[in-house]
Amino acid sequence: MENKTFTISVYSENNVGLLNRISGIFLKRHINILSLNVSESEIESVSRFIIVVNTTEKWVQNIVGQIEKQIEVIKAFYHVDEETIFLENALFKIESSLLFDEKQIQNIIKESHSEIVTVAREFFVISKSGQRAEIESLYEKLKPFGIMQFVRSGRISVSKERMQISTLLEELKQEPV
């Protein structure tokens, strides 16, 4: 089997220690996490982990199975890139004088569909949302001018197909205890 990029979505209760146990599942299998994002989900009191890995489908199935064995985990899914819509966000901090002295910077911002989010006396900050390749391209274009700071978020994604997590939760609520 060939390695592919997979996006794993984990719906869970938000409990202390769960992130550590989930990362341990990857550590035991020597699989590197390329990106990790945890946030609220569309369901009240339920968190969503978005984990990106490059591995085989057999390994990702095994990992999802192990993740679902964690008590706090409600459900875990995995998708290939073609089955999701995903973005990353990045911030670039650049010296302010360049904004006015280097007209190329203004063109780069416009052509990359980025936006300036703040301007201060010493620096300005550019925000870019998009695919990793778009962010890397902007980074390479800005690099010769000097980047004071750079940060990129982990992947955020939604599946193209409907995920049955809401239906599953409704069924769990209706089951007698």
Image (cartoon, rainbow, N blue to C red):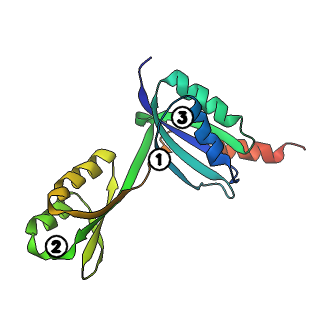
Structural crowding at the residue carrying mark 1, measured as other residues with C-alpha within 10 Å and reported as few (<14), some (14–19) or many (≥20): some
Q: Is residue 164 visible?
A: no
| Left or right of residue 136, residue 58 in this image | right
Residue 140 locus on image (x, y percent)? 20, 52
Name the residue type under label 3: Tyr
Structural crowding at the residue carrying mark 3, measured as other residues with C-alpha within 10 Å and reported as few (<14), some (14–19) or many (≥20): many
Structural crowding at the residue carrying mark 2, measured as other residues with C-alpha within 10 Å and reported as few (<14), some (14–19) or many (≥20): some
Name the residue type under label 2: Leu
Nearest the viewer among 117 and 146 is: 146
Q: CA distance from mark 3 to mark 2?
A: 42 Å
| Left or right of residue 169, residue 62 in this image | left
Residue 87 locus on image (x, y percent)? 39, 50
Q: Nearer the viewer, mark 1 or mark 2?
A: 2
Q: Which mark is residue 53?
A: none
Which residue is at 26% across, 49% downward?
136
Please determine whether, in this image, residue 84 is positioned above or below residue 42: above
Q: Label 1: which residue?
A: 157
Q: Label 3: which residue?
A: 78
Name the residue type under label 1: Ser
Q: Is residue 17 visible?
A: yes
Figure quadrant of the C terminus: top right
